[in-house]
Image (cartoon, grey):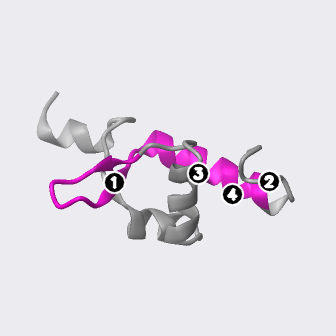
Amino acid sequence: MGPDDKVTHEHYPAYAMGGAAEMLSTTRSFLRSLDQVKLIDPQRSAAGHRRCTRHQLRLAARARKLVDQGIPLDAA
């Protein structure tokens, strides 16, 4: 796998929390709450910042829809 392939790989942590939140039209705190309930498990950069994969972003988007429908986060 070449360097360009990594970024498009499903499980490569390519997205910082701020960018991920913006892409999903949600907040960083919502994404952090998904981490706290272990729905997603972002990797940490060398500087300690959370980074999400495409797979995790899809899970987060689905969780956002469920929460918007009134389902508690821990049940999502």
| Sooner in the amino-acid sequence: mark 2 or mark 3 | 3
Residue neighbourhood size for the residue with mark 4, other residues' Cα within 10 Å, grouped as few (<14), some (14–19), many (≥20)? many
Camera-side mark, 2 or 1? 2
Q: Residue at x 50, y 60 (%)?
A: 32
Residue neighbourhood size for the residue with mark 3, other residues' Cα within 10 Å, grouped as few (<14), some (14–19), many (≥20)? many
Q: Which residue is mark 2?
A: 72
Q: Which residue is mark 4?
A: 64
- Local secondary structure at mark 3: helix
Q: Quadrant of the N terminus?
A: top left
Mark-to-mark CA distance, 2 and 4: 10 Å
- Local secondary structure at mark 2: loop
Q: Position of residue 8 (x, y in %)?
A: 32, 42
The region drawn magenta spans 42-67
CB-based contact (under 8 Å), mark 1 and mark 4: no
Quarter occupied by residue 53: top left
Position of 58 compared to 63: left or right? left
Mark-to-mark CA distance, 3 and 1: 13 Å
Mark-to-mark CA distance, 3 and 4: 6 Å
Q: Is residue 52 magenta?
A: yes
Q: Which residue is mark 1?
A: 51
